[in-house]
Amino acid sequence: MRKQAPFGRARARTRDLSFRPWFAVTVLAIFAVAAILGPILIGYDGSIVLTGSRLLPPGSVLDDGTTAILGTDQVGRDIFGQVLLGARVSLLVGISTLVLAGAMGTIIGMVSGYYGGVVDSVFMRLADIQLAFPSILLAILIAAMLGPSITNIVITLAIARWVTFARVARSATLAVKNREYVQAGRLLGASDLSLLLRYIFPAGFSSLVVVATVEFGLVIIAEASLSFLGLGTTDAAPSWGLIIANGRDYIDSAWWISTMPGIALAIVMVAIGLLGDQLRNRLDPALS
Amino acid sequence: MYPATETGGGEILTFLMRRVAMTLFVLWGVVTVIFIVVRIVPGDPALTQLGPTATAVELDAFRERFGLNEPLLAQYFAFLRGAVVLDFGDSFRLGGDSMGHVLQRLPLSLALAGTAMALALAVSLPLGILSAMKPGGFIDRIASTSSLIVQGLPTFWVGIMLILLFARTLNVMPSGGAESWRHIVLPAIALGLPLIGVIVRLVRSGLLETLREGYIQTARSKGLSEGVVISVHGLRNMLIPVVTVLGLQFGVLLGGAVVVEMVFSWPGLGRLLIDAIGNRDYPVVQAAVATMAAVFVGLNLAVDLLYGVLDPRIQVGGKNA
């Protein structure tokens, strides 16, 4: 594994502007609340088609007296409502994929690192083969194979992203498996499972948290890209990528359709990036 | 990575052979994965190509012609035999050798990725160096914040925004196609933007680390100007991580190009691939993915081998290891 030099001190000093973690955490909290409660709170369904109010610019007042603050799309759906529904898709896909890929990768990585031998060789060669594909390419292939749906996109991205977790979990396991405290546990009669769960896993936990934060962002972007290509979610669950794709044909007359979900996506990505940076500096300077 | 052993002689050869064998193994794995994935894709290629009006006889003739009636294992070995000589069969839809179509489109994708990388380097190298010269200073803070922002932007959305701004509103750039050099500018910017963030951070941290080394202090105490210290002594040692990352990032750019090509109707490999997936054109999908993965694997190999050239301290069977 290529290691970049630890850079904790100088970096922490220059980057540790105190507002940053709060900014990131606040944005992500708003994102989560908007995703979970937003579609309920606004009191209307963002996926409802209103042909009477098509392609209205942001701030337009609709026939029923409500205001479409982000405008409407080509079939009269409210963009703000759609962006909220899209947040739901992003959050759902992001978290489900992290759980699936994280569990898969961590278990494979820890087992490989702990037992070594054939198991290790097989999984690591598999990882090598997988890393020979640019990640988005593999996702495109698998997504095309499975067909568009939210479940399929979670499976696709989990398959495409488990390797990073596996590598980090494996190297953390290798680093501590022969330490005295682990050997002490072994001598006291702890089983392999208990050693892995209670002695080794906690040692690698902070690295895995940092990886998970970065991967969260990558997964959200990947989902948006796949949906943009028509390989992700369907109209039933409008993802930000899908809304952006829908707005492409109307870029001349209704710029807001593609623009708004992209701005939401960009803000969330920046917040995740900031948070990842902060966590890396605090928890795991060696990874930075 | 190069083994740091005390013995000399045949180590280089052993290392090279191991590395090449590993690369061949990975390539075998890649084409096998592609074969499996493509075979599981739902949808009958014969039906997709000939349409719902095709008779059973016609469908069967199509399958016979492209060997789709053979048992899977026989198809796999035929596929492997072909892959060795880069023959992935004739395209179902476009006619002619599928690899021929891929090779015709590949230069356009390489040009796009190359231009994106050049643009990213042109902006990020100076920015990274300036940041490292005054850590925590004005430029550093601006650069680190904007790197973070551009690193997270989705390329396809940036692409649409660039079209909206430069093609539709200002009318100074074409929005799609590949007729002149002007057509490459917007897609290259969209593709290269996230890379700027990556390189700025890399150059900054690499240079800062180098500047703490003893020989830099020696150079400074000799009375050399800061510019000479950085350009002669600092940058050279920073090249290794930068070249490594650039090599790997070029592959990432090729992957990202698939999405950007769709936004800008850039007739590269990515568009060929997405169309081929939609048409269930197996041979073209296989040839396109195998080519991209091979470029990616080749870059990895090249980067590994370059390591030793760039840093004389890393030696194969080195005497001073």
Image (cartoon, rainbow, N blue to C red):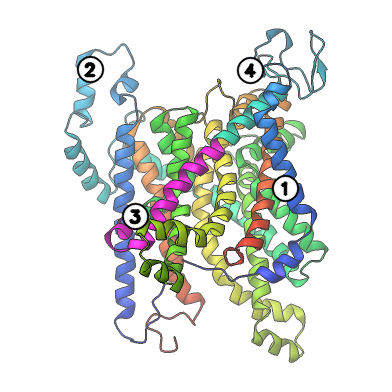
Q: Is tag 1's residue or tag 3's residue first in the polypeptide sequence?
A: 1
The magenta-colored residue range is: A93-122
Q: Which residue is mark 4?
A: A47
Q: Is residue B39 above or below residue A57?
A: below
Is residue B112 at all visible to an observer of this figure? Answer: yes
Quadrant of the image occupied by residue A236: top right
What residue would you read off at disc 1? A24
Residue drawn where x is 58% and y is 40% of the image: A220
Q: Chain of mark 4?
A: A
Disc nearest the viewer among 1 and 2:
1
The chain holding disc 1 is: A
Chain holding disc 2: B
Secondary structure of residue under mark 4: loop
Q: Which residue is mark 2?
A: B58
Q: Main secondary structure of the magenta part?
A: helix
The C terminus of chain B appears in which quarter of the rendering? bottom left
- Is residue A76 placed above or below A157 in the rendered structure? above
